[in-house]
Amino acid sequence: MTRLTITLDDELHQALKETAARQGRTIGSIVAESLRMRGIRTMARASDLVAKARTRSELAENQALSVALKETRQLRGK
């Protein structure tokens, strides 16, 4: 497992600590969950998801990728 150092403003750090304590979780688990919810995936994992979606939907690869990109951007608000 890799360690990561991030810089947060004091208020956000305090909120994160309080949330972790309230939920009985670690800060790391909350950060990891948040990244997954934002759609952060390795390229291999993202490609695997596209392949599975394409198989189920019978879309061509470029069509499936286009749909995946569109939905990811919508989820991220871009």
Image: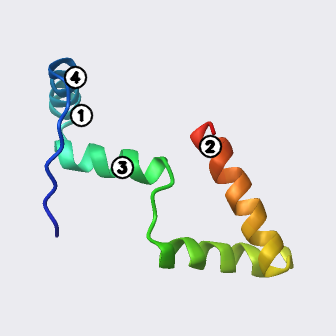
Res. 26 image quadrant? top left
Q: Check disc 4 and report the residue beneath it.
A: 15
Q: Check disc 1 and report the residue beneath it.
A: 23
Query: In the structure shown, which secondary structural element does the residue marked by tag 4 occupy?
Result: helix
Q: With respect to residue 35, does 19 lie above or below?
A: above
Q: Which of marks 2 and 1 is nearer the N terminus?
A: 1
What amino acid type should be assigned to the residue bearing mark 3? Glu
**Circles 1 and 3: CB atoms closer than 8 Å:** no
Q: Check disc 2 and report the residue beneath it.
A: 75
Q: Which residue is nearer to you in this view: 52 or 74?
A: 74
Q: Which of marks 2 and 4 is nearer the N terminus?
A: 4
Q: Earlier in the sequence, mark 2 or mark 3?
A: 3
What amino acid type should be assigned to the residue bearing mark 4? Ala
Q: Which of marks 3 and 4 is nearer the N terminus?
A: 4
* Mark 1 → mark 4, Cα distance in angstroms: 12 Å
Q: Which residue is nearer to you in this view: 55 or 44?
A: 44
Q: Earlier in the sequence, mark 1 or mark 3?
A: 1
Label 3: few (<14), some or many (≥20) within 10 Å?
few
- Residue at 70% from the left image edge and 61% from the top image edge: 68
Query: In the structure shown, which secondary structural element does the residue marked by tag 3 occupy?
Result: helix
What amino acid type should be assigned to the residue bearing mark 2? Leu
